[in-house]
Image (tube, rainbow, N blue to C red):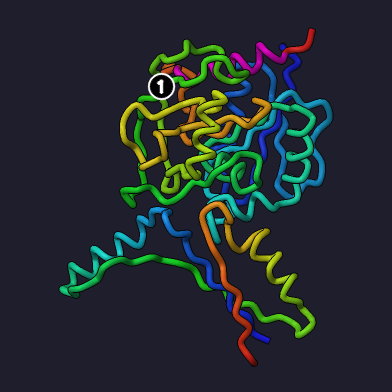
Amino acid sequence: MSGFRAAVITFPGSNCDRDMADALEKVSGENPFRVWHGDAELPDNLDFIALPGGFSYGDYLRSGAMAARSRIMRAVVEAVGRGVPVLGVCNGFQVLTEAGLLPGALMRNAGIRFVCREVPLVVANGQSLFTAGYEQGSRITIPVAHHDGNYFADDATLDRLEGEGRVAFRYAEPVNGSARDIAGILNESGNVLGMMPHPERMIEQAQGGVDGRALFENVVRGLVRV
Amino acid sequence: MKVRVHVSLKNGVLDPQGRAIQHSLEGLGFAGIKDVRAGRLIELEVDETVTDAALDEMCRKLLANMVIENYRVERVSA
């Protein structure tokens, strides 16, 4: 029992919320709160918020566009302002960019096709709250499953992200046409991480690997209250 | 009245869908296609009282993603 208080947000069409909750429970020993998109408030004193993967609102208009304007996201934006760590995976990353919590946008994969496979990543920043459990520059394997993972931002934004060490993960091989091979980025204050690969799908050997575990372990370790 | 909002990708933003459409058209034997850009048309039915400023705000807040898209609002007489 770590006392770790996490919340997993479910939007209509989320489909990785259960995997995310399961990963958080396995790593922290605590059952995360499950929060519905139409809720107005988050549980008190949260240590962590996860926006899971899936196809919220059927990807209507743009991936993540409707979810980013849902009721609970106002509370998430507020929590980000208070410094609560937020992880958005896949559709969660798309929601974070649509909500303006991370810069840039995730466009249709350059190869048009849905990509669903394990991909090698390079840990570009091994010092953030989310990535300090990895050695900087090390290679890890995490699965992706997306149609709209092609990260786009203008050159000035990309330069700033790189200059400020806000690129958390890069693809080690071509996956979706992302600018500068970006797979995951941090916000300015370092408490928001958006990434297309699914670390919650690499928690135990039964899933084919454990390379995603260090991310959650580090967040739990960094935040457990004594 | 009817309002049409035309959403298109900004210049310089790669459009994989447009490129795939171009390849398909060429596969059907159509020649001379230099470029294809796919956009989105959104039609709204609104009261006469809805201002241009409000329509503009709708586009910026939801209908278009200003990072990658441009929009054009067209009022169509009913």
Image quadrant assignment for residue A86: top right
Residue occupying the point 50% across, 36% down: A158
Q: Residues within 10 Å of mark 1 (few under 14, many from 20)?
A: many
Quarter of image, res A76: top right
List the residue tagged with mark 1.
A122
Q: Position of residue A100 (x, y in %)?
A: 65, 45
Q: Is residue A77 above or below residue A186?
A: below
Q: Is residue B75 above or below residue B11?
A: below
Residue B38 vertical placement versus A100 (above, below): below
Q: Is residue A218 magenta?
A: yes
Q: Residue at x 64, y 60 (%)?
A: B62
- Residue A56 lies in magenta, yes or no? no
Seen from the viewer's position, the closer of residues A197 and B46 is B46
Q: Which residues are magenta?
A: A211-223
Quarter of the image where the C terminus of chain B is located:
bottom right
Left or right: where A76 falls relative to A108: right
Q: How many discs appear?
A: 1
Point out residue A35 in the picture as x, y percentages from the top left corner.
Answer: 72, 39
Name the side, left or right, on which A188 lies relative to B34. Answer: right
Residue at the image point whose x is 75% and y is 50% from the top: A71
Residue A108 seen by the camera: yes
Residue sitting nearer the eye, A70 or B21: B21
Instruction: Give the letter of the chain under mark 1.
Output: A
Spot occupied by residue A30 in the image (x, y as percentages of width and height): 69, 19
Residue A26 is at least partly visible in this image: no
